[in-house]
Image (spheres, coloured by chain):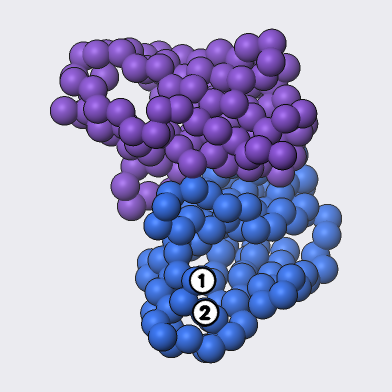
Chain colours: A blue, B purple
Amino acid sequence: AQKVTQAQTEISVVEKEDVTLDCVYETRDTTYYLFWYKQPPSGELVFLIRRNSFDEQNEISGRYSWNFQKSTSSFNFTITASQVVDSAVYFCALSLGNTDKLIFGTGTRLQVFP
Amino acid sequence: DAGVTQSPTHLIKTRGQQVTLRCSPISGHKSVSWYQQVLGQGPQFIFQYYEKEERGRGNFPDRFSARQFPNYSSELNVNALLLGDSALYLCASSPDRVGEQYFGPGTRLTVT
């Protein structure tokens, strides 16, 4: 069975701190995709990144970076120099290679205080 | 280009009633998926439609049904509403059967 675990329910930081959101996934499939989405208070899920199972290169996009490690089945997300606008619920998700079905974790609520 | 649009934004229904939610995908996207998000939880997959055919179904009762039209827009129908159906219903579109999914703003359904 496939599963995504986000063990951190809520994280609070002060602006400019770095913060890492953890994501651990389970699947026996060799072809799969991993995602991160941001859900601000407005409710709309904002796509951040998709990574396929054959590409373990880390990725950086501005203040965001992602660390994919198949050996530990983890796909962690780091925000550098956090800002108040980063406050949201962040979801990690998994899909298998033959479907769009996303399996979401329970989310991590990030609060960034000024 | 416009993003995924959903209507209505909010809806209040009574137990036992039926509801229809609508979704228009991003132009050029052929796949539409529906998700239910109960407060405090991650979204749960309900359906995927690609090229007007059902390609996947989550663990939801038969009271939930959907369809996709020739213009790739989609409707989600829920019959015999229960209090537990109260949730945010999200629609996502992607260009292919397997691709990056972009979500709409959702329809918040309240069942009283």
Discs 1, 2 touching: Cβ within 8 Å = yes
Label 1 packing within 10 angstroms: few (<14), some (14-19), many (20+): some
Image quadrant for the N terminus of chain B? top right
Q: Residue at x 53, y 58 (%)?
A: A38
Q: Quadrant of residue B28?
A: top right
Picture coordinates of residue B68, whole percent (x, y):
61, 15
Q: Quadrant of residue B74?
A: top right
Residue bearing mark 2: A83
Q: Amino acid at mark 1?
A: Asp
Mark 1 falls on what kind of element? helix
The answer to whether any part of residue B10 appears in the image is: yes
Q: Residue at x 40, y 17 (%)?
A: B20
The chain to which mark 2 is attached is A
Residue bearing mark 1: A86
The answer to whether any part of residue B97 appears in the image is: no
Q: Residue at x 67, y 53 (%)?
A: A34
Picture coordinates of residue B27, whole percent (x, y):
72, 30
Image quadrant for the C terminus of chain B? top left
In the image, farthest residue toward the front? B1
Is A99 positioned to the left or the right of A36 in the image?
right
Mark 2 falls on what kind of element? loop
